[in-house]
């Protein structure tokens, strides 16, 4: 009988979904700049989590965890 591999359990911090994109509060140039800054911040946080997830999965697959 083949050995069944246990499913990988991810650390809790790697399972948190990214936030929904922010919306502009108003139609002014300042409102656009503020929303763009917030979107850049959100992108940085989300992409950072994604990179950590990829690193974790690679470590598990290489037997380092």
Image (cartoon, rainbow, N blue to C red):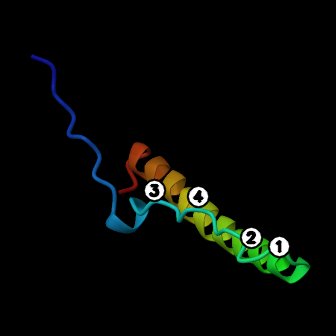
- Secondary structure of the residue carrying numbered label 4: helix
Count residues near mark 1 (Cα–Cα under 10 Å), then give few for <14, some for 14-19, many for 20+: few
Q: Which residue is mark 4?
A: 51
Q: Which residue is mark 3?
A: 56
**Residue 64 appears in which quarter of the rendering?**
bottom left
- Secondary structure of the residue carrying numbered label 1: loop
Identify the mark nearer the N-term, 2 or 1.
1
C-alpha span from label 3 to label 4: 9 Å
Q: Which residue is mark 1?
A: 27
Query: What residue is shown at x 59% (from left), y 63% (from top)?
Result: 46
Q: Which residue is mark 2?
A: 40
Identify the mark nearer the N-term, 3 or 2.
2
C-alpha span from label 3 to label 2: 24 Å
**Which of the two discs, 4 and 2, sits closer to the camera?**
2
- Secondary structure of the residue carrying numbered label 3: helix
Taking the view exactly as shown, the residue that stands out farthest to the front is: 27
Query: What residue is shown at x 33% (from left), y 65% (from top)?
Result: 12
Residue 41, position in %: x, y? 69, 74
Give the side of residue 48 with respect to residue 10, left or right: right
Identify the mark nearer the N-term, 3 or 4.
4
C-alpha span from label 4 to label 2: 16 Å
Query: What residue is shown at x 79% (from left), y 71% (from top)?
Result: 36
Residue 47, position in %: x, y? 63, 61
């Amino acid at each position: 009988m083949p050995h069944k591999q246990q499913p990988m359990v991810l650390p809790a911090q790697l399972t948190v979904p990214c936030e929904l994109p922010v919306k502009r509060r108003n139609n002014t140039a300042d409102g656009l700049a503020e929303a763009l800054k917030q979107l850049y911040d959100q992108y940085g946080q989300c992409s950072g989590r994604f990179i950590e997830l990829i690193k974790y999965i690679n470590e598990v697959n290489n037997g380092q965890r």
